[in-house]
Structure formats: C-alpha cells, structure tokens
Amino acid sequence: MGLNIVLKGSRVSRTGRSRVRFGRSPAEGVFVGSSAGEYDAWFQSSSGRYAAQLENRLLLELVPPELAGPVLDVGCGTGTHLFFLSRLGGCGVGIDSSADMLRIAQRKVASSGTTDIFLVRARVEALPFQDHSFNLVLLVTSLEFFSDPKLVLQEAWRVNRGTLLVAVLNRFSLSCFWRRVKMAFQKSLFQSATFYDPWGLKRLVQKNGPLKAQVKITWRTTLFSFPVVPLLAQPLLKRIDRLLTYLHWPFGAFLVMRAERN
C-alpha cells in the first residue's frame, strides 16, 4: 500500500521505499550520538524484549478495534512501537527531532522491506501536517522529554481525527523509584524527564484537548515488577502482570492512556 501524507504547504508522497524527510534542523533532544544506539540496543536485551512485549500488548488492548488508516507516532525514536502499531492501520508515520534515532529507524525499515512507513525529522511542537490527518496519534515514552508538553498535546489533537494514545513512564512505580535512586549517584538521560502519574496525566491530556469537546479517558498500567524481571520468572510475571492490569492497578511502570472525543 502506498502512502500519501499531506504536510503544511506541500504534498509529499512516498511509495515503493521508505525514506527520512529532513526539514529544518530541530533541537536534537536527549537521545543523540551513542545514547540513541544504546536506547535501541536495550530492547534487544532480555529485559528489553520482556518490556516491549508487555508494552505492545497493552497498547494493542487500548487501540480502537475499528482502526484503519494512517497512524502518527510523535517522538517515534527508533520506531519500536511505530512498526508494531502501523500494521493495524496499514501505514504509519514517525516524527522525531533526533537524526540519530531516525537513522536507526530507517535502517530497520529498510531491512524489513516494508513500504508503509514514512519518517520525518521536525519539531514535534509544530507538527508539519494539516489538521485531522491521522486516525490514531501516539506518544510513547516521549512526552516526558518534551520541554513544552502542553503544546505537543495540542498539536497531537490538532492533527488527529480519531484517537490519541499517550504512554508514559509511571511516577507511581517501582521502576521510577529505582531510577530516582540511581540518579542520586550517577548521571542519567532521565534527569531531564518529567514523570507522570495516571491522574496528573489525565488532567494534562484533558486540559490540552480539543476546544468545546468532552474527552473520554481510559487508562491502564503494566510492568509491575520492572526492572526486576529474572529470565526464569518471566512467564509467571507475565501472568501476574496481566491480572494486575485487568484489576486496574495503578503502579505499573508503563502507563497507557487512551483519549477520545465524546
């Protein structure tokens, strides 16, 4: 399937092969140089694969079942979640300010042979797309690192004609506590991050939602024992995790919120 994306002021189409569209040089963000490669390599580790499986499972559960059409991943990074969810809508667009992250995503797309992923480098605070261009807009563990999350959410709503899916690192989790302890003793990329809890994120998403419209919110969490995920215990931990997600337990490391216009 080919993909035509309408950008402000021009029409850019990509068919046959994926490519990165480099606009004006935006701020790179925190994931540059070796940190971009380290981020992507982590998902190939035992803990990373475990996390990706549970994260994608929860994202899939909160994606509208009738989804069809283009998906936008804001702050797509190396494309870990974009590649997974774009299969549901048939095509996907990833946008990020980090050229290093996008180069890794580009290599993944090229090696996979897909023709339905388009990557754009631009500022996420000023998305280069016309209003209501996408049926699903994602922000997966990216909102924490934006200097102006309110503006990013307003832009995400502007280009969205369907559902907004926001996934963040949960402030009320064992994982976040462990990160804060580590940051007291060593430098970390997460020192520039803002962590959200379910209720704070809900207020932020609703306050910066579409004008004169009610926003319906649904949220769940997963990865309750993370980062303690010993390999032999992972099958049992997955079953426990699924039960706690079903019970709406708010202390998982990965918080996913679905927002829809009523």
Image: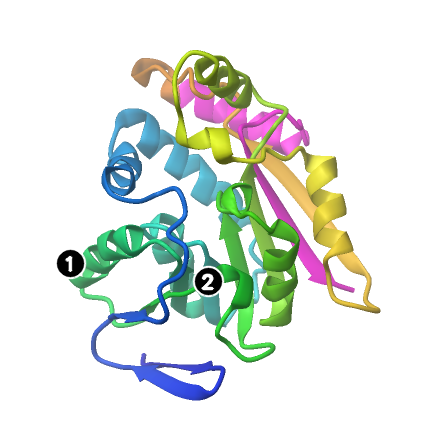
Which quadrant would residue 162 be assigned to in this image? bottom right
Q: Are marks 1 and 2 in contact (CB under 8 Å)?
A: no
Q: Count residues near mark 1 (Cα–Cα under 10 Å), then give few for <14, some for 14-19, many for 20+.
A: few
Who comes first in sequence, dot 1 or dot 2?
1
In this picture, residue 33 sits left or right of residue 47: left
Mark 1 or mark 2, which is nearer to you? Answer: 2
The residue at 37%/15% (across/down) is: 233
Position in image of residue 92 (x %, y %): 40, 67
- Per the image, the residue denoted by label 2 is 123
- Per the image, the residue denoted by label 1 is 111
In this picture, residue 65 sits left or right of residue 33: right
Q: What residue type is labelled 1?
A: Ser
The residue at 51%/69% (across/down) is: 127
Query: From this viewpoint, which residue is outermost toward the bottom?
Result: 10
Q: Does the magenta stretch include residue 240?
A: yes
Quadrant where the image shows the N terminus: bottom left
The residue at 49%/82% (across/down) is: 8
Q: Which amino acid does label 2 sit on?
A: Arg
Q: Does the magenta stretch include residue 44?
A: no
The residue at 28%/40% (across/down) is: 40
Quadrant where the image shows the C terminus: bottom right
Q: Count residues near mark 2 (Cα–Cα under 10 Å), then give few for <14, some for 14-19, many for 20+.
A: many
